[in-house]
Image (cartoon, helix red, strand yellow):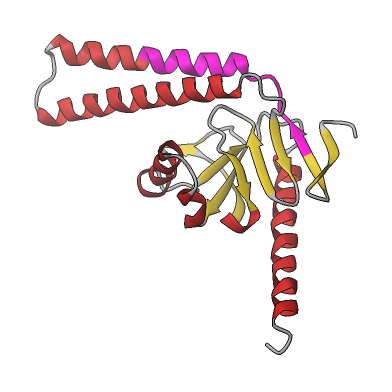
Amino acid sequence: MENGIQPKQHSGEDSVHFRSEDSSGSDAFRLNLLLVLAVFSLAYILSGRIDGLLELGVWVFCLVFCTYLIADSIYGIVKAKGKGLRGVLVDGDGILDRSSWVSVGRVYWHEIKTIYPINPSFFGIPLPRQVIGLDVRDGFLLRRSARIRFKVWLNRKVFRTPDIQLSSGKLRKSRTQVLFVLQEGLRQYELRSISEAKELDPGG
């Protein structure tokens, strides 16, 4: 099919693949920016111009957080190399997200609570990012690495954002179109689950 949506067969059901644009340039820019921030933070700490423990704590936090983001972005970029799928795949099992270097991979339908659009902002200033939020159940975290669990914890406890953020800005379809397919997939799964439960318990 045209415009980046290609139906495929997966687990006996039609699937939809939202292909992503080449993002190597933006990923490299983001990584370089983080490196500059980390080096600047380290240089400021070592300069001796810090006055007070609070200021020192702020700069140490900036350094540690930038270092984490640098390591996380390098890991994601390296992991994405050689992958045949770039974008988001929606099928009968759930969602397979490889749209960016912060993608979490496979999320099954039964692990998802809600799917909704979010409009990110920075100190009240709207950002032009096209983001879809996913809140997941604890079962998703149990099978994931410590890296993914830590990212979800940061989103929940520190940033107060959705557990998972799917960036639709790089996809070749609008956020509205992607969101509709995701929400419809979750709705169909919930309907199937209800139907299967009734078949198992006909007298309930």
Q: Nearer the viewer, residue 198 or 180?
A: 198
Q: Which residues are magenta?
A: 17-36
Residue visible at 61% across and 16% down in the picture: 24
Q: Quadrant of residue 40?
A: top left
Q: Considering the image in quadrants, where does the N terminus appear?
A: top right
Left or right for 90, reference 41: right
Confirm whether the magenta stretch covers residue 21.
yes
Residue 15 x %, y %: 80, 44
Report the magenta stretch's main SS: helix
The answer to whether residue 133 is above or below residue 110 is above
Residue 113 visible from this viewpoint: no
Confirm whether the magenta stretch covers residue 80.
no
Residue 188 x %, y %: 75, 61
The answer to whether residue 82 is above or below residue 129 is above
Residue 153 x %, y %: 39, 46
Residue visible at 10% across and 22% down in the picture: 51
Residue 31 visible from this viewpoint: yes
Q: Nearer the viewer, residue 49 or 146?
A: 146
Residue sitting at the far front: 200
Residue 117 x %, y %: 61, 48
The answer to whether residue 74 is above or below residue 196 is above
Q: Considering the image in quadrants, where does the C terminus appear?
A: bottom right
